[in-house]
Amino acid sequence: FDTELCGYTSFSCIDQPGTSVNLDPLREVIMNRAHYRNLGTHEVIVCNHVTDVDGTDHAGIRWYELRRTGGPGQPWSIHQQGTYAPDGDSRWMAGIAINDLGDIALAYSVSSGSTAPSLRYTGRNASDPLGQMTVTETSIAAGTSGNASNRWGDYFSLDTDPSTGSFWGTGCYNTTSSWRTRIFEFSLPVTSPDYTLAVTSNTATACQPTAASYTIQVGSLLGYSAPVTLSVTGLPAGLTAGFSPNPVTPGGSSTLTIGNTGSVAMGSYGFTLQASSTSGPKSLPLTLEVTATPGATTLLAPANGATGVSGALSWNAAANADSYSVTIATDAGLLNVVESATGVIGTSYTPTTATAPLTTYFWRVQAGNACGNGAASPTWSFTTGDCVPLVIKIVLDRYGSETTWTLEDDNNAVVASGGPYTDEATNGEYPQPDVNVCVPEGCYSLIVNDSFGDGNCCAYGNGVISVEVAGTEVAAVSGDININNPVSAAFCVPRCTSTYPFSDDLENGTQNWTQDATDDFDWTLNSGGTPSGSTGPAGDHTTGTGSYLYTEASNPNFPSRTAAFSRCFDLSAANGATLGFWYHMFGAFMGTLHVDVFDGSTWNNSVWSRSGDQGDVWQQATVDLTPYLAADLEVRFRGVTGSDPTNGWQGDMAVDDINITVSSGIRASVQVFLEGPYNAGAGSMNDDLRTAGLVPTVEPYSGIGYAHVGGGGETTTPGVLAVTGNNAVVDWVVLELRATGDPSTVVASRSALLQRDGDVVDTDGTSAVLFQVPAGSYHVAV
């Protein structure tokens, strides 16, 4: 035979009527799949390819039957072969298959200058002379015109029906100017009565010690009715086999039960189903999978209680496991589940939702298989690192199976990936679930590939894959993508704001503010009034018509439900910093607004708070951030709705016009002793007020009418007040800086803490007192 049909490089070869366009012969390869069947006494492979029949570029089909006897390790040989080309038309692009009777069918395209591209089939019975297709050629679908393109026949297939021995296939033919696909079924003529042998599934699973079963189907050809007796050979010692009924009348079925499965080790066992009747024997290979409920899973990494975690969770493989389920929650009882996955293959899983920075998660893994689930692993915890949350948003065109993507860092390490996805029935845009990932500061590339080369776009739908940081798109890939030539978009993510003064009136949305993923509900960006009466502002603070953030306290967000949002600030270069904002807390059943600060290692909760109805007016607040200065300081606004189970909806709180100012400032190191608590024998002051619990966490002087200059409202923490020894707090004092030219003029004043050894320190209990004034000379008053 000669496979050099129209040369080795031409895509234009097969004639068709009414056009100069010729069709692709696809001459270099074995067409479609090679079809394998185990007929019991021997194994068979049938295959085919196109060939030049007579040296004139006249296409015919070269077909083969290969056989092997004796099982693996024995050689294959060509049992028969032939070329099918009964006339001057070209035949090519064939599918070939063999049924359990040994009959071979061949379905193919046919075309010529007088025959439009059509579908036909032929075949042979097992008893026919070798090398010949004896069944009369039969039309499946007749073409009526030529194809406008030389592209042809990518999607052909032929297979057998295990219950009837008929053949099912799919192939192309031409009606107008473009091809159509036909799904078809046909049977080859039966020359003598016989029976068929089939099984609904060749593999069954036994969960020790229970039995496994197979459904055996015995069919009838040309009215064959002689009883068929069933048996098995090659069954491992200890296993038992029983048929019900046995023998079987053709047209009926029998159940094969394999018992005593506890007598063998877990594993895969092959054996043979045998059938005998007056027309002769038949056989089928069967497989028994013996397994048991999976064992318990042991977690591997990250270590229990690990911090700074990002990336994959991993565990040790459990005995007999086929897959795993993963559960991740924000509580040790796994009640508040934030992410779960089932059917996980392998021993690792990368969270896509449980990625919020500086958040503690609890997780466990459970193995499963066809027998059920094993014991769940112990519950471990991990805390995520200080990272930048990214949201990967995915919109696909119709052909999602062609699209894959990766997110890679600047060392080409894959941070996240997705696809291929599922195809849809019609053209359009198909959003997929968001993928959440938290990454360190740095530069990254979003890389998208299309396996077919026509992109995630165009006539099939306008797809796009993009990356968002805090609601802002930082990278996107869309449009045409050449095959195996991925398109990428690069971006960088500095996590923390580092330009000051910082001011945000929320007119551009939430920008880099991040909603807490572990709270009960989110803050809402709004303008105008809130939906509920008798609570919330009528408008924003800035203009009355702009935007602000508020907690919508209506059902189901009360009672005592939490909403939080935060942002990171780099204050490593500052000697002092002040947070300013405006808040609105109007409602008879108002909850509490907290400001929390993360200092790079620890969350300091409620460094500022207000509770209850504060009136229908915007109010200003300031918070000294100086005790918490860090490169990754985070400010979090945390609203908790009121506790009233009936009227808690009257608790809409709001914030607006958030700002941070920083200054190099000066620090005043001052020492002073108060006469009253002074203990001359010890050379220090007594801290009786502190030990009696009478030193408040909020400075008391503003409350009795002292007007601070640039300060006031300072707060400390219970931890500072718990310190004992020489650094124990004696009381609050006011420290004033006064002008050198006029000592009666107060330039700046702050409340500070006085310690037993006479040191006057800032609210962190250790630092000298910071004043936001230029460097220079001042009088100091206490």
Image (cartoon, rainbow, N blue to C red):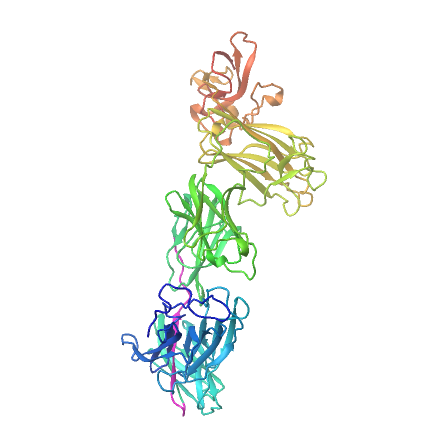
Q: Compared with residue 660, is residue 211 higher up or lower down, i.e. above or below?
A: below
Residue extending farthest top? 741
The percent coordinates of residue 673 (x first, y second) are 48, 16
Task: Return the residue nearer the eye: 96 or 437.
Answer: 96
**Residue 298 shown in magenta:** yes
Q: Which residues are magenta?
A: 277-299
173 horizontally vs 313: left or right: right
**Residue 294 at what x, y percent from top left?**
41, 64
The picture quadrant where one finds residue 531 is: top right
Q: Is residue 86 visible?
A: yes
Q: Is residue 25 magenta?
A: no
Residue at the extreme right: 533
In the displayed structure, 599 sits above or below 329; it is: above
396, 183: nearer the viewer: 183
Where's residue 357, x and y in %? 47, 42
Badge count: 0
Quadrant containing the N terminus in the rendered view:
bottom left
Give the camera-side residue of 126 and 307. Answer: 126
Q: Is residue 208 above or below residue 508?
A: below
- Against 590, residue 437 (above or below) is below
Say if residue 419 shows up in the picture: no
Q: Nearer the viewer, residue 275 or 407?
A: 407
Asked whether, in this view, residue 217 is left or right of residue 643, the answer is left
> x and y percent of residue 123 in the render?
43, 81
